Amino acid sequence: MERRTTIVILVLVVLAAAGGVAFWRLRPGQGGQEEAVRSAVVERGEMVVAVTASGRIEPEARVGLTFETPGRVAEVLVEEGDRVEEGDVLARLDTDQLAVQVEQAQAALTSAEAQLAQLQAGPRAKEIEQAEANLRSASAQLSAAAANRDQVASGPTGAEIASARARVAQANTAVEIAQDAYDRIEDEGTEKEQANYDLFTAKEELAAAEAQLEDLLAGADQNELRAAEANVAAAAAQRDASQARLDQLLAGSTEEDVAEADAQVEQAQVALALSELALRNGSLRAPFSGTVSEINLTVGELPPTRQPPMILVDDSALHMTISVDELDISRLEEGQTAEISVEALPEVTVDGTIRSIAPIAAIESGVVTYDVWIDLASTDAPLRTDMTANATVVVEQLTDVLRIPTWVVRVDRETGQPFVERRVGDEVERVDVELGARYEGVVQVLSGLSEGDEVVRREENTTFDFGPPQ
């Protein structure tokens, strides 16, 4: 749309009827032919200078809404044309996994806060008692492991060998008794089977006693000794850890410990905030109250990437932006009133006010213009966004000026000088004129004519017209 401005003149005072009347007069021309002559009278009156430009009616805001979190559309809660309030949820993504992440982050934060609180409060009596008990237990285990290692390293005592030999002798006697009992039973049956089992058990016991005696007589086993040493080392490490824990409890928390725990709490808070933000971003919310003008979402599919999932319009207030030529922009200022006419509603006019003027120009094809924002006043007229409208801003009032219709003005082909033909008696003479502002067939005369002069237009004239006949 053409949005450059022009300076226009609006007539405020109705001129006298005689001055506004033009008429055709037929008079003989050269060769006896008749020529048509149209005339008008130079009048004096009041006029105003205005800047006019066209544009489109726009809403207060038109925003394309997008999801900040990836995912498939779970539900769309509005339809095109619906009115919504700020903060309303318009659509949701599938956010089950995001909700689980929020719960995990909350649990991590709770744990970190509890650890920090414990360090700040200091150890409790029960914690110290438990640490002391753990140390005693670990020390006892270390002593037992060391004794066992020493016993394995020193080998068997005489008493242990004698005891092992006595066990072998007892086992041999048990075998003889069981063998004798088995041999006395001739018939096969339950009694025979029991005797056989008793004999087998006695022989197993004898074999075990002999193996133990053999091990004792062979001395310390290196594998057993290494295992005993490992048990001692493990018990010592456990005792040291128990001692360190008790010492820490008795000494209390250091500044470094508290600072580290505090940092862990902050990290957990950030993680929770990020997970909650991701969950919130799974819902498309209205940033302001308005009307849903476009929806590009399908349940079960991913939101589109080449167009906004939804467009929201704030039509609580309307405005229009016009582009004003650099020659005219100095005539405008914030707060000036404007009259807005709508092409689709020719009977409607709306008041407007200049809200702001762009500080930086836009240059297109060498033409320098500045954007001017005009707020429209509230109206009951059925205005809609994107309607074509024209804005007129009165910038100057002219009083006591001479004016003539533009159709009487001619332009000399050779010099470019504007002139008119003035009737003097029965004669018509050419008069060069200096012109000012013009609008819709009316032009201001700065010099060359006087009030009451009759100017004419003869149709056979071959010079350029300054303006079309009105």
Image (cartoon, rainbow, N blue to C red):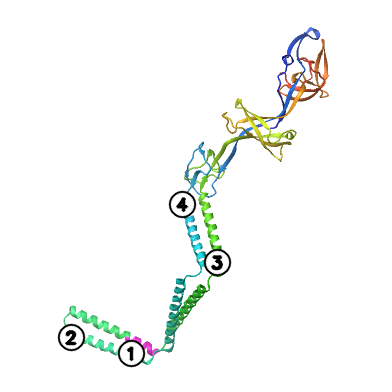
Instruction: Tell whether label 4 touches label 2 (CB within 8 Å).
Output: no
Q: Along the horizontal axis of the image, is 326 left or right of 389?
A: right
Quickly name the residue at label 1: 163
Residue closest to the far left: 187
Which residue does the image show at 28% across and 89% down from the upper left?
Answer: 170
Compared to residue 143, the image places residue 118 above or below, namely above
Q: Is residue 289 magenta?
A: no
* Sequence-first tag of 3 and 4: 4
Residue 333 placement: quadrant:
top right
Amino acid type of the residue that numbered disc 4 sits on in the rendered structure: Asp
Q: Position of residue 169 (x, y in %)?
A: 29, 90
Q: Nearer the viewer, mark 2 or mark 1?
A: 1
Quickly name the residue at label 4: 96
Q: Is residue 192 visible?
A: yes
Inter-mark Cα distance, 2 to 4: 81 Å
Residue range corresponding to the magenta coloring:
209-218
Instruction: Tell whether label 4 touches label 1 (CB within 8 Å).
Output: no
Which residue does the image show at 55% across and 49% down from the upper left?
Answer: 68
* Sequence-first tag of 1 and 4: 4
Instruction: Tell whether label 1 touches label 2 (CB within 8 Å).
Output: no
Residue 450 placement: quadrant:
top right
Inter-mark Cα distance, 1 to 4: 71 Å
Amino acid type of the residue that numbered disc 3 sits on in the rendered structure: Val
Quickly name the residue at label 2: 184
Q: Position of residue 470 (x, y in %)?
A: 71, 18
* Sequence-first tag of 2 and 4: 4
Amino acid type of the residue that numbered disc 2 sits on in the rendered structure: Arg
